[in-house]
Amino acid sequence: MNGRLLLLIESNTTGTGRQFAQRAAAAGIEPVLLSADPGRYPYAAEDGLRTVTVDTADPAALWSAVRELAEAAEIAGVLSSSEYFVATAAEVAARLGLPGPAADAVRACRNKTAQRRLLAGAGVPVPGFTEVGEVAEAVDAAARLGLPVVVKPVQGSGSVGVRLCASLGEVADHAGTLLAATVNERGLAAPTRILVESYLTGREFSVEVVGHEAVVTVAKHVGPPPVFVETGHDLPAALLARRRDALTACAVAAVRALGLGWGAAHVELRLDGDTPRVIEVNPRLAGGMIPELVRRACGIDLVTAQVRAAAGLPVTLERDRDAGASIRFLTVETAGTLGPADAVEEALVRAREVPEVVDAVLYRAPETPVGPAEDFRGRLGHVITAGSSTAAAARAAEEALTRLAGALRPPAEPSTVQPPAPTDTAPDHKDRKDRMDRMDRMDRMDRQEIV
């Protein structure tokens, strides 16, 4: 046998995929990426990551590749940072007798209708919902639930295909589009069912859970309707203690109700008055660079924890700092282009000059056409900040994002995003001065130890 291997079945295209491989190597375990198209992940070639090309959607072909690897080395663990392959990774880990979540629980969790039924049956609050397979059924469901409604695929990630519909005509149009799709954005077969659910207008949060322990609550920024593009995160969320406690209790109850409890879960919720309602539970680490924000603000490395858990190694979640961290994603509201190389570089330099900035990056090449984001794939870049408080980090992220937007031609403000206020009001997408005023109030609350 030659060393120990951590098998990574596919990856997310942004976020923690690269970090999974890096943390495995740091633990003395060789990461191996199994993928139908390793070239989909540029970091694999850039980092010299060992890859195996295999049809990961074909269980027999995948198992054959795994057995071949197992004949030459010890398999220490199996993971996936891709929403679409977490159940596959759990199944392979179980066949090998390795640690991991219950595959059946992960599979049920990934179906949004099955998930909501399990949660509602356990008394965990969720939005009103109906699963449908025909356009007429979607229209009827929307009429029963009351407009506006959210229409979305029963499986998916990154807000792909999720849309707020304000009229029955919009419901029919979007339902027709979703039901006509035969494959999703990963080229995998798309379910022929969709979900129609009540629209909740309260503030949106996520709770990052490991096992049955809530690690941190995150304030989420979502762009303007009708789409639901996540445009930023702040943590720890500035919240009154009773609301924070209600969110974390609801998130842990959801994880238990779904039969999860191994490793990480990313629970998305909205406050409906004083009642948290679960939007969805993802049986995996959060995307959107949230694990990196947790590491910066709390000193807890969720990626390392997940890798070590998969390999059967001891895991620690001890917090070693009490700071704040934020991320803002660059999006635009109208079509345009990124500027020439010198303008792009200048914008990056200026963004990185903000004292609290720890990362600033653009995902597109100079002079690339850009347009409004419909889902996570429309985000153009990001800035990450770490500060003495949540408000300080958020303020710095706003400033750095404005500087990064200088890469656009003509120069423009990034899409307006309303940071969370210290109350339960919904985002109203006002101007930059209003956003900064709200963050000043958050900062005062931090200093007064109200949150």
Image (cartoon, grey):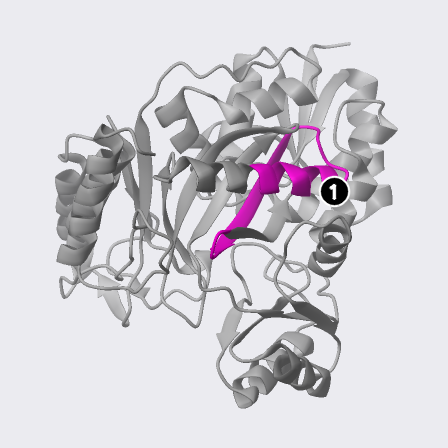
Residue in the foreground of this view, choosing between 160 and 124: 124
Give the image quarter of residue 394.
top left
Magenta segment: does it hold 199?
Answer: no
Residue pictured at 66% horizontal, 81% vertical = 144
Q: Which residues are magenta?
A: 249-274
Answer left or right for 340 relative to 196: left
Residue 274 image position (x, y, % from top left): 48, 52
Query: What is the quadrant of the N terminus in the image?
Result: top right
- Residue type beneath disc 1: Ala
Q: Secondary structure at mark 1?
A: helix
Tell me: residue 410, above or below residue 352: below
Q: Which residue is mark 1?
A: 257
Give the image quarter of residue 282.
top right
Residue in the foreground of this view, choosing between 243 and 397: 243
Magenta segment: does it hold 273?
Answer: yes
Answer left or right for 228 relative to 31: left
